[in-house]
Image (cartoon, rainbow, N blue to C red):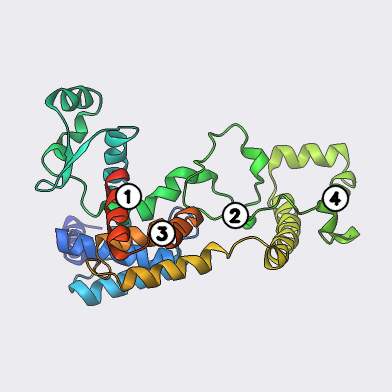
């Protein structure tokens, strides 16, 4: 290839390169709200969206803003938002007695507090003049991911919780609903010889075990993963059937709908506004749902509680 052809190809590549994404406060807010919506639809099964979620975000973002960004550009901005959120949390974590500056939309603290903090976290200096925008929505996107992170358990992962014993425990207040399994006996889980995990292990010779251990063969992984999936599906079916007949309170999925119905009819709460989005996060917690419905008697108390949770979640 001569120099002329190489130069021509390079120029063509530059012309077809997608322009750099430009994010302003409006487009960023649209992106964040679309992400929250897709997460609520179940399209964020891990720390990131699945293909269906990303496709929906890209399409709706284009329709709302006129900006045609691809998945990589969206993912880069997602990563940037997560870093900003983590920095804000690092700044405010375990702090009590802080005020709120409604003009700057950031925490109100003494000069001494800021000096001490910025010596440890100099990157957080920007939050002294302006707080983290869309904080409640970012809490909803990243809060439970940060609590469980890479150690979030899914039946298809092929990893049991006890295998993560050396990892830091997740927060007990991470807004994730967990069914009560205290009254479930392992004897009630239907098993047969074809799904026995121990039988599979016993039938493997020591030599075969060593080969599988060293090579990590796909076949061995697929065997254990398939068996594990089947076993866990049976456990989950027992959990669901037991929960349906128990005398425990209504599942959080149902009571959260009652909370959202109250929220939608409250004066001072704009649909899809900051307090509304805060509610969508809080009402994933069963205890908060019952407190909201049973302990607070009117909209004035509901609104005061939402504002308090907003400040507390900084």
Position of residue 93 measured from the top left corner of the image (x, y, whole percent): 33, 35
**Residue bearing mark 4:** 200
Position of residue 229 measured from the top left corner of the image (x, y, whole percent): 70, 59
> Seen in the image, is 173 located left or right of residue 208?
left
Q: CA distance from mark 2 to mark 3?
A: 30 Å
**Earlier sequence position, callout 1 versus callout 4:** 4
> Seen in the image, is 153 located left or right of residue 308?
right
**Earlier sequence position, callout 4 versus callout 2:** 2
How many numbered discs, if any? Answer: 4
Mark linked to residue 292: 3
**Which residue occupies 33% across, 56% down?**
75
**Which residue occupies 26% across, 53% down?**
307
Q: Is residue 234 above or below residue 61?
A: above
Asked if marks 2 and 1 touch (Cβ < 8 Å), the reply is no
Given residues 291 and 198, the one toward you in this image is 291
Position of residue 31 measured from the top left corner of the image (x, y, whole percent): 27, 63
Position of residue 240 measured from the top left corner of the image (x, y, whole percent): 68, 65
Asked if marks 2 and 3 touch (Cβ < 8 Å), the reply is no
What crowding class fits label 2: few (fewer than 14 Cα within 10 Å), some (14-19), or many (20 or more)? some
Q: Nearer the viewer, mark 4 or mark 3?
A: 3
């Amino acid at each position: 290839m001569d120099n002329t052809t190489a130069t021509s190809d390079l120029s063509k590549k530059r012309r077809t390169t997608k322009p750099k994404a430009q994010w302003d406060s409006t487009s960023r807010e649209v992106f964040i709200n679309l992400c929250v919506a897709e997460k609520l639809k179940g399209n964020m099964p891990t720390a990131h969206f699945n293909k269906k979620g990303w496709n929906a975000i890209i399409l709706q973002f284009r329709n709302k803003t006129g900006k045609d960004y691809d998945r990589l550009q969206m993912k880069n901005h997602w990563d940037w938002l997560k870093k900003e959120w983590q920095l804000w949390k690092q700044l405010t974590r375990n702090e009590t007695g802080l005020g709120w500056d409604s003009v700057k939309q950031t925490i109100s603290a003494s000069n001494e507090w800021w000096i001490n903090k910025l010596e440890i976290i100099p990157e957080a200096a920007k939050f002294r003049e302006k707080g983290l925008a869309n904080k409640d929505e970012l809490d909803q996107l990243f809060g439970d991911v940060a609590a469980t992170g890479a150690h979030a358990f899914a039946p298809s992962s092929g990893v049991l919780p006890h295998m993560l014993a050396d990892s830091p425990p997740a927060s007990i207040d991470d807004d994730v609903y967990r069914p009560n399994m205290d009254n479930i006996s392992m004897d009630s889980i239907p098993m047969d010889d074809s799904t026995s995990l121990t039988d599979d292990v016993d039938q493997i010779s020591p030599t075969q075990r060593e080969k599988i251990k060293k090579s990590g063969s796909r076949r061995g992984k697929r065997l254990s993963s398939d068996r594990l999936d089947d076993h866990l599906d049976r456990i989950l079916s027992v959990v669901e059937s037991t929960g349906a007949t128990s005398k425990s309170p209504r599942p959080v999925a149902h009571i959260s709908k009652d909370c959202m119905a109250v929220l939608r009819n409250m004066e001072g709460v704009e649909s899809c506004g900051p307090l509304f989005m805060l509610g969508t996060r809080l009402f994933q917690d069963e205890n908060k749902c019952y407190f909201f419905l049973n302990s607070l008697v009117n909209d004035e108390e509901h609104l005061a509680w939402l504002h308090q949770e907003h400040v507390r979640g900084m």
